[in-house]
Image (spheres, helix red, strand yellow):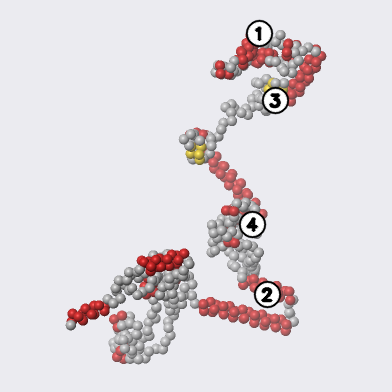
Amino acid sequence: LASEAATQSGSEGIVGLDEPKKMTREDWRKKKELEEQRKLGNAPAEVDEEGKDINPHIPQYISSVPWYIDPSKRPTLKHQRPQQERQKQFSAIGEWYKRGVQEKSVTTKFRKGACENCGAFTHKKKDCMERPRKVGAKFTGTGIAPDEHSQVTLALDYDGKRDRWNGYDPEDHQRIVEEYAKVDLAKRTLKAHRLQDELASGKLMDQTEREHNSEDEDEDKYADDIDMPGQNFDSKRRITVRNLRIREDIAKYLRNLDPNSAYYDPKTRAMRENPYSNTGMNPDEVGYAGDNFVRYSGDTITMAQTQLFAWEAYEKGSEVHLQADPTKLELLHQSYKVKKEDFKEKQKEGILEKYGGQEHLDAPPRELLLAQTEDYVEYSRHGAVIKGLDKAVARSKYEEDVLINNHTCIWGSYWRDGCWGYKCCHSMVKQSYCTGDAGIKTAVSRFVLCTKVLLDTHDRSGYVTYFFVSSFFPFPPVDQLSLSAEDKRLRQVEMMMQLDERKRPYNSLQEVKEPTEAEMEAFRMKRSRPDDPMASFLGQ
């Protein structure tokens, strides 16, 4: 009988724990079709025991309860949500520490469980801080001490620990408002009594003067105590500060609503960067380009330096002020800068005179001395500059803008009749000295006289032309060797020009030797002019 009872009780204990019956193929197909329809949104989602929808995309092993736990339970996601019994409980927003001693009636009878020495109910005899009595309060029933002021234990969350207004009592501010209301009421009463006294005595002020005085009294309430170096205060002088902000101004944080634009500090109400920097607008065209732009533009830096000088001068005993005496301060600042520069120059000269070293100050830059700089330049494998500054390209291998022999213009600045010269004196001789305006007048007169003689002779030959021109222009003498050398050169050039370019010698048409004056004169005599009517007869 015992074994049968045990078997029966064991079978009753596992009631409902049987394995689920195997589904038929038709039921399995219907179940899969329903799941597909739920995933597509054509069928309503499955509901758990709390009435909340279950996402059809959640796997079955997460939403379904295993059959060996409780096969009767429906699919649910309750185990995925925070459990209320496991959540940490925090103090409410209205809970805070007690302030002040709680006023209660004094206990006159000893209470069971209280301190046997003093009679307080908040501690025991071994924790009592009072002097041990000869006969405790438990036996006398008199002189029972009040209970201690015990504070509550608060469990604050993350926001509660950082809330600056946590524990603030609005009644404190209400008491301040009531106090100011009483002061205002007393002022109005006093003003009404003063008007009655003036009316009774017949010394009633004008209406406009009374309104002006009332406005000044209102401004005095909002005046700030200004403490600025260099300002003398007088008890009889009235200081008022007005609000100069225009109500139509756009707030800084509303100029660009892009969250990646300039940062606005709500505590100091400052926006240092330009809010329109990412829009491509010019800072000079916008109405507001940031506090830094306003601070470091125009004469702001000069004004700041002048203000700093005024403060330093005031600390050293000078009675100057930027707003009170701007002209005096400006003159004093200018004289101070001049004296400072003179002092630095004298100090530098004294050091150089005592120790020397002027040659080190006149030395060329360090980059030119060591041919090294700290400028970063990155090159490619082919020698091209990738990052950094490109090398400066030399314009010419010859010296430029070199003035010699008192000339004010360089050689080649003047050209006439196929000849180069100096523009300052119209001289055609390269190493000649400058004669200025006199040389220009002489050259013009000689050219006019030479032209007149050539026209009178009616001679077209080059020799006669050369004869008359050489009589007025002192050309160097030409010998027969120079003329023959020029003929030889011309024949060589003509022969080279008839050859093919691929058969010409290397540098055959390039002359590296500087020609002499006689060779240059022979070249001028032998060259053919295209405008000469006798040029076609020169070769005959």
Q: Mark 3 = which residue?
A: 414
Q: Which mark is first along the chain, 1 or 4?
A: 4
Residue depth check, mark 2 versus mark 4: number of the one nearer the observer:
4
Q: Identify which residue, 73 or 325, lies in the foreground.
A: 73
Q: Residue 235: x, y in percent?
A: 62, 69
- Residue 26: percent from left, percent from top: 38, 68
Q: Is mark 3 on a helix, strand or loop?
A: strand
Callout 4, which amino acid? Gly
State which tag comes first along the sequence, 3 or 4.
Answer: 4
Disc 2 element: helix
Name the disc covering residue 480, or none. 1
The C terminus appears in which quarter of the rendering?
top right
Contact between marks 2 and 3 (CB within 8 A): the answer is: no
On the image, numbered disc 2 is attached to which residue?
214
Q: Which mark is residue 287?
A: 4
Q: Position of residue 134 (x, y in %)?
A: 28, 87
Task: Give the class, few, some or many, for how many residues have Cα within 10 Å of label 2's Cα (few <14, many ≥20).
Answer: few
Measuring 68% from the left and 15% from the top, which residue is drawn there? 527
Q: Is 475 situated left or right of 498 in this image? A: right
